[in-house]
């Protein structure tokens, strides 16, 4: 018998937690992007688990779309990082706080 | 305790170790290049998890797109900007940020695990997109995804195509070096 | 009959539309011809309807369409053709035709003549809607229509301050009266659940005496506004600011008769309240007397005529108050004849002197105005009550009914009759006799008016002479009184012995003669006499000043107080205060925006944590 889907879901939750904690504590924009990728992958893992559990290919199609959007997001995000770095020679997000109230 | 088939249990354990280990590596190492490399480890673990759950196509895409393209893009940017020496681990400047982050994330993860534990998943629910046909393993899976993408999800598929194009144009525009225009002073 | 009766209303509307939509293409003469023809068509339609009515002798309701249908409020649009409406229509359309014709001459060369005829036609249309309506609400539409038209026409020379404010004054006084009509409608609908006349009349007896009195008083308020009675009479003399044909139209045919018409129309309700009728009679009698005293001291020829109108309408209201509806209508018709004649005659005089209105700068005009003079003479004798002209018979009818019902009011009426003869003689003498005082200010020769102006004068003079034939007291068949009686609730005419009637008639004649002789002897060889022109009378008994002191000035100071104190210290302070308080509180809130992305992300995660805790708690319970 196969490992139940719940195990994979727990794994995905832990992965998401690690990514989230990293996003909240690291200051380098590039590392934060990597953490976002971790969180997205955690979500993808749950999609695939549910696709198997519910026997629905729709979950896998969603993963496909998430990957495409993630690719686009990384492209634009890293473009922004490059643009910011040119002005500030730093990738620390804490230095970008001009929009405070 | 239910006894699970040995191969599937072994696969899960390996998958979990790779995934979480890679993720913790991203979180903990100082050098961004090393962080990117451990991200690849984590992504391989996720791909293994896909493979174990009859998502062969996605496992392949995961490795090709994520490990192959996205992480390479990360590495490229790191090298390009030359920030591999910088590290920001010394002191947390935002007071209480680490504690509150740990608290929030801990509550969320534990809460979700509690929800998973208390839920009863019903398998074999008639599905919308496949009309209750079980997921096919191997190459049959690719056929199913292809069918779904070009029929049921056609509009979303086209939209993501447009999104990619826009992202490319946006990234090119962002990364372009600003050249002073004629008649304008150089700032 | 139905279709012809509809034409009465539609003709003026058609004329209005034609002038309105072709105004730019019509010459001023063309506009006058269209407008006059439209009203004349309406007159012909009225004549035909009248002829047909004489054959059937039954009142007819012509249902046009359902106008308002909301729950129990069912208001049809319809025409109610009965003797009263027909009588009103006859003289309204007839005299309006003459006034339209006259206007073509009087207004020649004025600016915006098309607009003038436009308003005139709309005025006549509104009056006919008012008169022919089969329910109170439709009457109210016409009522407001004449109010609006009078506003436009009185302030016709709107670039003159006095004309503009006279128009406003007329409008505001009329609004006060309108409240009365609205209140009457509310009361009637509340108790009878209908506004249709015939239904009101059949159900009127179910009204309690208190309610009936309230309704009658509300109607009286409406009538005092429209018919210029105490306490709302001040607007009418100011309305002289309009062109003279408008004054004639307002005073003789339309507008001011509306109030009396409304009271007569609602006679079945009036019949239920003796107190209400007594109030009406007292208001009418007082107005007649007060206005007559004021008229003795005015120097403007049109002002004298204006107060004379107020006084004569007071007679009519007095007659209504004592239940002599037939006499009231008789006087209304006779008054329409001679007052139109007098106004158009005075217009002719003013025209000949190029706009001079002050009687002190007239005099000796008789030989220059060969047609205006004799016709004006007839008008003067008619209003003074000299037999056998129409005014004698009409005023006699009112005074005879009065004598039977209330001796005090009769005495007041007789006194007013003396005053009437007095001030009209003064006006006549100052205008046509004596030295040619106009020489000082007017250079040139006064000239007689064109035929379009004199023909109406001649016709009206003939009508003033013959008007008495409508209702001679010793004929009781085929008179106005018998014709109209189906429209009245109860005509409280007490049969008088013929001996008493003759002595009352002699008293009327004596009153007229006293007034005539007194004025002649006093004014024959002077044109100013401060002793006889008391400033108290000339200032309208300080009526306007009293209103100014009691209503005008307090309201002005209240407005000033609101403008400076309430506006600045209360409203502005509240607005500005809430704005600054909002700014301060948002300054505090904006501290939360630290600008650190990771703070925002943390807030999001903590929010998700709360949601997860809630979900866990929900699943667990």
Image (spheres, helix red, strand yellow):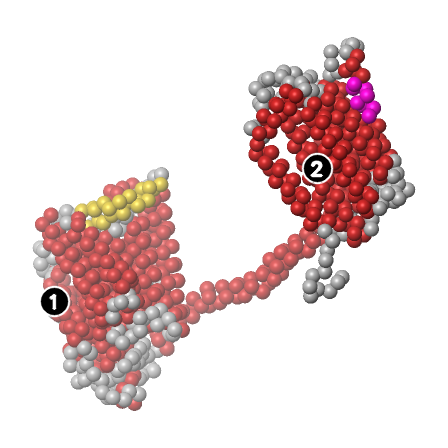
| Residue C326 or residue C251, whichever sits in front | C251
The answer to which quarter of the image holds residue C371 is bottom left
Residue C508 visible in the displayed image: no
| Residue C148 or residue C372, whichever sits in front | C148
Horizontal relation, residue C569 to residue C493: left or right? right
Mark 2, secondary structure of its residue: helix
Chain to which mark 2 belongs: A
Q: Is residue C36 above or below residue C263?
A: below
Mark 1, secondary structure of its residue: helix
Residue C451 visible in the displayed image: yes
- Name the residue located 61 percent from the left edge and 27 percent from the top edge: B146
- Name the residue located 81 percent from the left edge and 21 percent from the top edge: B14
Residue C469 image offset from top left, x and y in percent: 11, 63
The magenta segment: B11-18
Q: Which mark is residue C185?
A: none
- Name the residue located 80 percent from the left edge and 32 percent from the top edge: B40
| Residue C207 or residue B184, whichever sits in front | B184
Q: Which residue is mark 2?
A: A71
Q: Which residue is mark 1?
A: C466
Q: Is residue C71 above or below residue C532?
A: above
Residue C421 image offset from top left, x and y in percent: 22, 73
The answer to which quarter of the image holds residue C278 is bottom left
Chain to which mark 1 belongs: C
Nearer to us: label 1 or label 2 = 2
Neighbour class for label 1 at 10 Å: few (<14), some, many (≥20)? Answer: some
- Name the residue located 37 percent from the left edge and 71 percent from the top edge: C158
| Quarter placement of the C terminus of chain B | bottom right
Residue C540 image offset from top left, x and y in percent: 36, 72
């Amino acid at each position: 018998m196969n490992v139940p889907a719940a195990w994979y879901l727990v794994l995905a939750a832990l992965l998401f937690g690690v990514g989230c904690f990293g996003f909240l504590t690291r200051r380098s924009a590039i590392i934060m992007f990597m953490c976002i990728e971790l969180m997205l992958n955690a979500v993808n893992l749950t999609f695939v688990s549910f696709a198997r559990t519910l026997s629905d290919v729709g979950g896998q199609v969603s993963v496909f779309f998430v990957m495409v959007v993630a690719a686009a997001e990384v492209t634009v995000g890293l473009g922004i990082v490059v643009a910011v770095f040119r002005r500030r020679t730093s990738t620390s997000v804490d230095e970008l706080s001009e929009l405070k109230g | 305790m239910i006894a699970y088939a040995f191969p599937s249990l072994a696969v899960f354990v390996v998958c979990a170790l790779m995934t979480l280990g890679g993720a913790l590596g991203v979180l903990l190492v100082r050098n961004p290049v090393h962080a990117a490399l451990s991200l690849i480890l984590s992504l391989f673990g996720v791909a293994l998890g896909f493979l174990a759950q009859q998502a062969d196509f996605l496992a392949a895409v995961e490795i090709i797109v994520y490990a192959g393209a996205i992480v390479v893009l990360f590495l490229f940017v790191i090298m390009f900007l030359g920030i591999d020496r910088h590290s920001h681990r010394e002191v947390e400047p935002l007071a209480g940020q680490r504690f509150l982050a740990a608290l929030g994330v801990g509550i969320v993860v534990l809460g979700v695990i509690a929800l998973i534990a208390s839920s009863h998943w019903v398998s074999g629910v008639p599905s919308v997109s496949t009309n209750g046909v079980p997921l096919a393993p191997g190459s049959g899976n690719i056929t199913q995804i292809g069918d779904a993408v070009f029929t049921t999800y056609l509009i979303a598929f086209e939209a993501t195509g447009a999104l990619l194009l826009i992202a490319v144009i946006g990234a090119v525009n962002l990364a372009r070096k600003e050249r002073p225009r004629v008649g304008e002073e150089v700032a | 009959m139905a279709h012809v009766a509809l034409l009465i209303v539609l003709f003026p509307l058609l004329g209005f539309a034609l002038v309105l939509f072709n105004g730019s293409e019509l010459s001023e003469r063309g506009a006058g011809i269209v407008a006059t023809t439209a009203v004349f068509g309406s007159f012909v339609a009225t004549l035909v309807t009248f002829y047909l009515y004489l054959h059937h002798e039954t009142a007819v309701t012509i249902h046009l369409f359902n106008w308002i249908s909301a729950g129990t409020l069912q208001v049809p649009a319809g025409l109610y053709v009965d003797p009263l409406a027909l009588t009103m229509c006859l003289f309204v359309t007839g005299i309006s035709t003459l006034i339209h014709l006259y206007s073509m001459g009087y207004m020649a060369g004025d600016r915006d003549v098309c607009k003038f005829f436009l308003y005139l036609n709309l005025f006549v249309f509104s009056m006919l809607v008012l008169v022919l309506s089969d329910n109170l609400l439709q009457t109210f539409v016409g009522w407001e229509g004449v109010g609006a038209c009078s506003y436009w026409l009185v302030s016709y020379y709107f670039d003159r301050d006095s004309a503009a404010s006279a128009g406003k004054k007329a409008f505001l006084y009329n609004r006060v009266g309108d409240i009365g009509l609205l209140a009457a409608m509310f009361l009637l609908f509340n108790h009878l659940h209908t506004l249709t006349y015939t239904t009101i009349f059949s159900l009127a007896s179910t009204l309690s005496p208190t309610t009936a009195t309230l309704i009658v008083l509300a109607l009286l308020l409406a009538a005092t506004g429209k018919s210029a009675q105490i306490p709302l009479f001040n607007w009418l003399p100011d309305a002289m600011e309009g062109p003279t044909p408008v004054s004639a139209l307002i005073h003789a045919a339309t507008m001011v008769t509306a109030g009396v018409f409304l009271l007569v129309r609602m006679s079945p309700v009036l019949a239920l309240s003796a107190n209400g009728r007594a109030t009406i009679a007292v208001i009418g009698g007082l107005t007649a007397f007060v206005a007559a005293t004021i008229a003795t001291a005015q120097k403007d020829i049109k002002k004298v005529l204006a107060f004379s109108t107020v006084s004569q309408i007071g007679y009519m209201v007095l007659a209504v108050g004592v239940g002599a509806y037939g006499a009231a209508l008789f006087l209304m018709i006779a008054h329409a004849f001679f007052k139109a004649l007098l106004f158009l005659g005075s217009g002719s005089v003013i025209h000949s002197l190029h706009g001079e209105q002050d009687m002190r700068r007239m005099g000796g005009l008789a030989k220059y105005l060969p047609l205006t003079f004799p016709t004006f003479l007839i008008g003067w004798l008619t209003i003074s009550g000299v037999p056998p002209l129409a005014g004698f018979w009409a005023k006699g009818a009112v005074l005879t009914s009065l004598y039977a019902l209330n001796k005090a009011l009769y005495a007041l009426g007789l006194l007013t009759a003396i005053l009437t003869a007095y001030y009209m003689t003064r006006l006549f003498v100052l205008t046509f006799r004596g030295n040619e005082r106009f020489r000082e200010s007017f250079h040139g020769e006064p000239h007689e008016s064109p035929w379009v102006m004199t023909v109406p004068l001649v016709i009206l003079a003939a009508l003033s002479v013959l008007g008495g034939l409508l209702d001679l007291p010793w004929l009781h068949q085929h008179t106005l009184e018998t014709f109209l009686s189906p429209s009245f609730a109860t005509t409280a005419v007490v049969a008088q012995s013929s001996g008493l009637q003759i002595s009352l008639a002699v008293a009327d004649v004596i009153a007229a003669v006293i007034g005539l002789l007194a004025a002649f002897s006093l004014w024959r060889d002077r044109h100013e006499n401060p002793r006889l022109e008391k400033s108290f009378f000339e200032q309208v008994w300080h009526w306007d000043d009293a209103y100014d002191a009691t209503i005008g000035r307090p309201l002005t100071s209240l407005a000033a107080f609101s403008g400076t104190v309430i506006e600045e210290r209360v409203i502005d302070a509240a607005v500005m205060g809430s704005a600054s308080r909002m700014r301060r509180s948002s300054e505090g809130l904006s501290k939360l925006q630290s600008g650190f992305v990771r703070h925002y992300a943390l807030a999001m995660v903590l929010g998700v944590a709360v949601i997860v805790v809630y979900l866990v708690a929900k699943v667990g319970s």
